């Protein structure tokens, strides 16, 4: 029987969940059922949630872990009445911060993930559409506007990474597939012509050939495209090109899209147009 | 002169930044320059960072705010030597959690955003490609596989929202544009035929017509498409359809993509295929 952890917020729940998962990931051997409860922004919703928490405690036979980022004092009070081990993030840190900053906090519900300025929204939309318009080598004439151009074999993770960079950081990421069209006579890849004048913007992705074969198999089962031999060969050629041309690259097998994106930013000095909210 | 806040992590920095921004957003009147420093996973990197922090303190004439989620004790020790007001998230909460859970934490660097299981990765890739394949009404024959179908006028935020749902939660979101092709003789919108049999999966987006005009203006300046009159009319027709057909909807003007997505999930009971890491 496993214990339940609740991540509770008056807003999106992103902060509470992110912190909660970070903390609980440190306990490898503890099995926990994790539930995120966003938009707990009225006393009524808080009371309903207390019933849910009480039910979980009874079913589990153990008190839940409760991690919250609720700002409103009276709502927090209700949550406090639930059975559980409570980590109250805001009351832990806001008081000392108020003292340090010499001012009171505004305690505004849901402030963190509100949209902020129009520019952020526009930049975000613009970057997403840039990624889509410049996906998979569809166009190359906008590369002068790109912040980065991801390259790699088909299905190594270029598209999701481009989109994540656009959504989270407003980075304009194009991507271009490395294919057999660009093979030299000796079987090695040469830099596709469209990319040659943008060498300083290139970033390579690579992937374990077995993982690649599995991903391609979902798309085109039992094809040459998804065969392990073909995947091994393409990956070798791509990595050869990266090394030869000194193009920085990351292995997407080992990392999540968050890690690939943040590592790229850290390594290349790419500038975020805005910050995740 | 503004003070600096550092969000420091041995991993992506997503948790430290998310929590840091949440906390500091409560201090509306305090101007802070916020810097995220991810992948501080060696003593050398930590020492370099201490120099940067010391420089910021000297330049600002005030000590920085330092918020970190570093797990390794010796690296944390180095950061502790920097001048600043420190919020050490892990040491604050891990000890009490260890006691409550009756076990030691594993203190593993970068554990939070590691990729976990292959399935999560595959699900994510699959959902992103589903969103792309089913973007803007491009196809309708896969709607039986969709978890949700977003509808709305051109440029109201359908595509970024679909992609966010795919990337963050593995939700398969198609989207379909409401256009003049579906106007009735009386000038009201009728439900497009492709959507009729999937009514329970529909979710509407709407937007302030002025914001819509501004967004469309970026794409096609001074066109009928981007005129305020046209935008007012289309938005009215769309909202009329939502009300008439009892389709739940959200105004994207007021909310960020995070908020739109998490509110949709909360309102509709959509199931996340995995959790953000």
Image (cartoon, coloured by chain):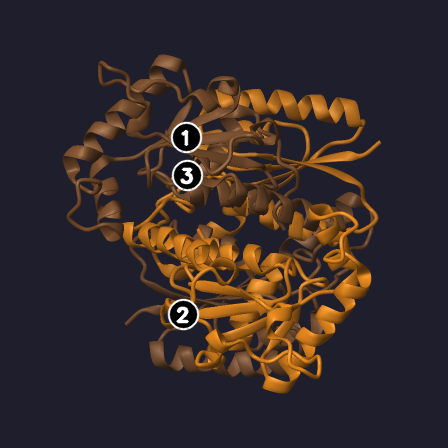
Chain colours: A brown, B orange
Q: How many residues crowd mark 3 within 10 Å: few (<14), some (14–19), many (20+)?
A: many
Asked if badges 1 and 3 are on one and the same chain, I answer: yes
Residue drawn at x 68%, y 80% as measured from the top left: B188
Q: Secondary structure at mark 1?
A: strand
Res. B59 image quadrant: top right
Q: Nearer the viewer, residue B257 or B210?
A: B210
Q: Nearer the viewer, residue B219 or A106?
A: B219
Q: Secondary structure at mark 3?
A: helix
Answer above or below: position of B103 versus B202. above
Quarter occupied by the N terminus of chain A: bottom left
Which circle, 2 or 1, is nearer the viewer?
2
Q: How many residues crowd mark 1 within 10 Å: few (<14), some (14–19), many (20+)?
A: many
Asked if badges 3 and 2 are on one and the same chain, I answer: no
Q: Check the residue under mark 1 and report the chain it is in.
A: A
Answer above or below: position of B104 versus B141. above
- Dot 2 corresponds to which residue? B143
Q: Position of residue B200 (x, y in %)?
A: 48, 81
Distance between mark 1 and mark 3 Cα atoms: 7 Å
Q: How many residues crowd mark 2 within 10 Å: few (<14), some (14–19), many (20+)?
A: many
- Dot 1 corresponds to which residue? A151
Q: Position of residue B45 (x, y in %)?
A: 50, 23
Distance between mark 2 and mark 1 Cα atoms: 31 Å
Asked if residue A100 lies left or right of residue B45, the reply is right
Which circle, 3 or 2, is nearer the viewer?
2
Residue B147 in view of the camera: yes
- Dot 3 corresponds to which residue? A158
Residue drawn at x 17%, y 45% as measured from the top left: A223
Asked if residue A120 lies left or right of residue B106, the reply is right
Residue drawn at x 45%, y 57% as measured from the top left: B131
Asked if residue A1 lies left or right of residue B259, the reply is left
Distance between mark 3 and mark 2 Cα atoms: 25 Å
């Amino acid at each position: 029987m496993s214990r339940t952890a609740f991540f509770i917020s008056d807003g999106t729940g992103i902060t509470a969940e992110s912190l909660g998962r970070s903390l609980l990931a440190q306990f490898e051997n503890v099995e926990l059922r994790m539930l995120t409860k966003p938009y707990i922004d009225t006393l009524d919703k808080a009371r309903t949630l207390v019933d849910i928490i009480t039910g979980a405690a009874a079913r589990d036979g153990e008190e839940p872990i409760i991690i919250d980022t609720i700002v409103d004092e009276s709502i927090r009070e209700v949550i406090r009445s639930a059975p559980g081990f409570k980590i109250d993030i805001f009351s832990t840190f806001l008081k000392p911060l108020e003292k340090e900053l010499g001012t009171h906090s505004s305690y505004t519900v849901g402030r963190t993930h509100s949209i902020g300025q129009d520019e952020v929204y526009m930049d975000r939309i613009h970057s997403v559409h840039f990624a889509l318009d410049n996906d998979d080598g569809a166009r190359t004439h906008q590369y002068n506007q790109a912040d980065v151009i991801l390259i790699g074999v088909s299905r190594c993770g270029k598209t999701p990474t481009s989109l994540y960079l656009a959504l989270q950081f407003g980075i304009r990421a194009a991507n271009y597939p490395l294919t057999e069209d660009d093979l030299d006579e000796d079987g090695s890849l040469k830099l596709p012509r469209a990319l040659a004048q943008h060498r300083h913007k290139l970033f390579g992705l690579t992937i374990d050939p077995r993982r690649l074969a599995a991903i391609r198999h979902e798309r085109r089962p039992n094809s040459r495209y998804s065969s392990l031999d073909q995947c091994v060969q393409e990956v070798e050629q791509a990595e050869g090109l990266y090394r030869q041309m000194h193009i920085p690259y990351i292995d997407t097998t080992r990392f999540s899209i968050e890690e690939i994106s943040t590592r790229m930013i850290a390594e290349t000095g790419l500038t975020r147009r805005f910050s995740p909210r």
